[in-house]
Image: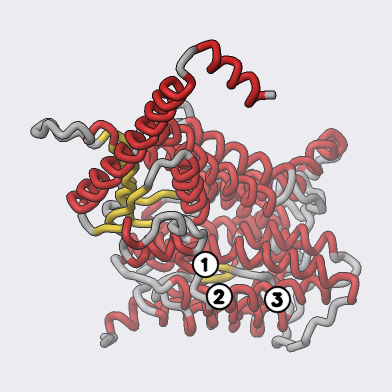
Amino acid sequence: MKISLSDIHSDVLGGITTAAVVYPAALAFGIASGLGPLAGLYSAVSVGVCAALFGSSRTVVAGPSAPMTVAMAVIVAVNADSLASAFATVLLAGVFQIIFGLIRIGRFIAYTPHSVITGFMSGIGVILIAINILPILGHSAGSKGPADVVPLLPNMLRNINIDALVIGILTLVIILAWPRKLAKFIPNMLAALLIGTAVGIFWFQDAPVVGQVHSEFFTFAIPIPGIGDIYHIIEHAFLLALIGSLYALLTALISDSMTSGTHDPNRELVGLGLGNSLAGLVGGLPGSGSVIYTVANIRSGGRTRLSVIVVSVVILLVVFGFGEVAEPIPLAVLAALLIKVGWDLIDFHFLANIAKIKRTHSLVMLLTLVLTVFVDLMTGVAIGLIVSGLANAVKTEIFELDNVISVPLINLESDDPFTARIGLLRLIGAFSVASSSSLVRVVGADIKEHDVVIFDFEPTTTIDDSAAIIIRQLIETAINRNTPCIAIGLSDSIKKDLAGFRALRMIPPELRFETLEEARHQAHLLLKKLDSKQYETQAVKVRSHWFLEASLGSSGFALELSHYIQT
């Protein structure tokens, strides 16, 4: 791909502009996580550079993000006595993401239902707003979410820091009311940061500030946790890896829609995993692709990886050259920035139209949201996926059963007396666990009404394990009732699906055919043979009865003989 001078100019300008958005957000995320402002800035550099160099998307900007920060805040609170365990969790999360990419499950993560994603992201937004209400009031943010904030509010409202409240409200107003024409030159978040900080320095000086920030280069250290923490580290690392992967791939999809580009989800996860592993080594927050940063980059002119790299380089220069510029920033300013980020994450469009949306989708969204806010992130996603899967299974069951044809094989153009006695069971499309249990109820009764059953697998595409077991049960039920079964249209894939569960063992090879006509002909032969056996059995009974009457001569003697035989 050729890059012109105009592209370079556009990418550099876009990168610098995006860095102006990333810098205050990274500071705010670092403080909100409990690890301090440098942790957020280190994440912006390490995760941003690795995702740009090793990822697949040309315009996605990675760094500290709302979902990862909320998750990390919980992890830091749990490991308050051992930050080594917290950073080991970040490192291991990166390793998990690399594994996700190498085993190529990136595209499966993208299959997460929209109702689960929007419920989860809205829950993150609610949490982010809740934990930043206290800094707006002038108090430290030491809570995990609404359940911790609500009990503290009465006391906090009686002890409001007026300076912090004024600065926080002013910052929010600037973010919301900043003119679009000016935003082309100074992003609203940067403008709010500069103006809010200036107001704090010159007028409202009693508001809490970031404080001392040392400008220091990365110090690489392998975090060594305690033996007893390993289980929780693995659990939390998998949570971080899952959340980060989901949000990163969602960001990549949004980037593709804005630039008409494409991305490789597996390569995206490898690049992100390398960045998070590096962040764990240097003491940074875990990161992911960020919608906020990416949209800012694209709208500012970024079109290639150069713009993404420029973002990290600019932040690197600021951190190591002018780290002290962050010291006078009021915490209320950063809290206001995160409240706006949280507000943007809540899907108000979905909530406003929830009465018009399908009930199952609304239920999944609300359930995921509530569990994310009041229980934990993993529970919210896990239960959301389970409920969504069950709802989809119900829909799949109806669809699959609609594709089952179970009818007598009647030929209206023929006087063949056998046709109504032959049952045809045709399975069209895919069959899974969703419909397997209902197949017995729907089809089982039909099979009992026929003397021969033809199983037509020609239009069948796939059969999962549960459906294969049910088909075996149907065949066994028919055979146990002395009803012969014939199979037609067995492709190699269907044979493999059924053979693993011995579903075809009671249909010998001579009763397997390619076409329906061949199966019909064989069914006629089986019926004639069956009728012949029944005729012979009936004839034997008649001859036996005649022989007894002829031999015994009288009914009285027959009764005596019968009584003698019985006794």
Which residue is found at the position 66% from the left and 57% from the top?
334
Q: Position of residue 233 (x, y in %)?
A: 78, 69
Q: Position of residue 331 (x, y in %)?
A: 72, 57
Q: Which mark is residue 444?
A: none
Q: Position of residue 157 (x, y in %)?
A: 81, 36
Using residue 507 as the reference point, say whether residue 387 is left or right of it. right
Report the Cα–Cα distance between label 1 and label 2: 8 Å
Crowding at mark 3 (Cα within 10 Å: few <14, some 14-19, many 20+)? many
- On screen, residue 150 above or below 389: above
Location of residue 239 (image quadrant): bottom right
Label 2 near label 1: C-beta < 8 Å? Answer: yes
Q: Which mark is residue 289?
A: 1
Kind of residue sitting beneath label 2: Leu
Q: Which residue is mark 2?
A: 272
Mark 1 / mark 2, whichever is N-terminal: 2
Quadrant into which the C terminus falls: top right
- On screen, residue 126 above or below 39: above
Q: Is residue 176 visible?
A: no
Kind of residue sitting beneath label 3: Leu
| Residue 405 vs residue 110, the one in the foreground | 405
Label 3 near label 2: C-beta < 8 Å? Answer: no
